[in-house]
Image (cartoon, rainbow, N blue to C red):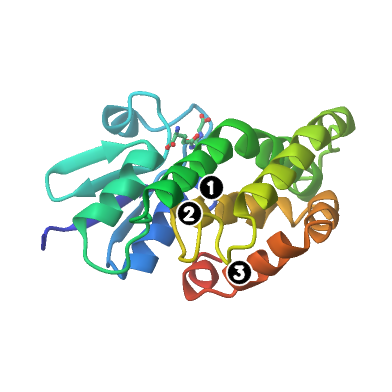
Amino acid sequence: MGERVRLYGATYSVYVRIVRLALAEKGIDYQLVPVDVFATGGPPPEHVGRHPFGRIPVFEHGDFALYETGAIARYVDEAFPGPRLQPADLFERARCNQLISLADAYAYRSLVWDIYVERVERPADGSFPDEERIAAALPMARTCLAAISELMGGHPWLAGPELSLADLYLASMLDYFVRAPEGEAMMREHGRLAAWWERMAARPSMVAIG
Ligand SMILES: N[C@@H](CCC(=O)N[C@@H](CS)C(=O)NCC(=O)O)C(=O)O
């Protein structure tokens, strides 16, 4: 398994960050090849050759190429030595996969695009946030945080006693969400989740992605 590992994507991308977190937690060296999918004119044509939907990340391990973060993250966990990122326990693994689906289906758009991008990125670019879009997303964000907190229960990590891919997925999204005042306030309403977030944010893998 000594083949070169390459990741195509941008450092700002939530999904690229999830894979970078998995690679860091496993202790794998890799090359990050910059690809800006939001460049004027769309994703570079050579990237569409790698990813027919023009998204990031794309992952390569030797001659084996893969897109879709869920597949990449599970491959990284299974192909390389290091701490396992998918629980061995059936129920905890099911919980981990449930949380990953929740992140993809409900959290990404509302927490990152509707709230963080509008509240933080738009003003930083000199535009006004779309307040209606933010207000419309807040109930979904509330449901997401309540559901994650409920599923986590009394465990130190989201899917059980050990760190898993569920933590990496949601940390990548919540990291942006809490930069919006609405996100920071909402996180504070969930004591156990807020304590998890502090532990998560201090991990070297999180510090490394900035
Ligand atoms: N289902 C994809 C989602 C990846 C994704 O949406 N990536 C974003 C960046 S975080 C992207 O490439 N967006 C470009 C676009 O929407 O055109 C995965 O799991 O990898």
Q: Is residue 54 above or below residue 164?
A: above
Q: Nearer the viewer, residue 54 or 158?
A: 158
Of circles 3 and 2, the one toward us is: 3
For the N terminus, which image quadrant? bottom left
Residue 202 is labelled as none
Residue 61 in the figure: left or right of residue 37: left
Q: Which residue is mark 1?
A: 14
Residue at the spot 11% in from the left edge and 63% down from the top edge: 2
Residue 134 in the figure: left or right of residue 91: right
Q: CA distance from mark 2 to mark 1?
A: 5 Å
Work out whether mark 3 precedes mark 2 in sequence or the reverse, and give the earlier one: 2
**Residue 34 visible within the image:** yes
Q: Which residue is mark 3?
A: 201
Residue at the spot 64% in from the left edge and 39% down from the top edge: 107
Work out whether mark 1 precedes mark 3 in sequence or the reverse, and give the earlier one: 1
Q: CA distance from mark 1 to mark 3?
A: 15 Å
Percent from the top left, x then y, of residue 171?
A: 58, 56
Q: Secondary structure at mark 1?
A: helix
Q: Secondary structure at mark 2?
A: helix
Answer whether labels 2 and 1 touch (C-beta < 8 Å).
Answer: yes
Q: Secondary structure at mark 3?
A: helix
**Residue 11 visible within the image:** no
Percent from the top left, x then y, of residue 63?
A: 12, 44
Answer whether labels 3 and 2 touch (C-beta < 8 Å).
Answer: no
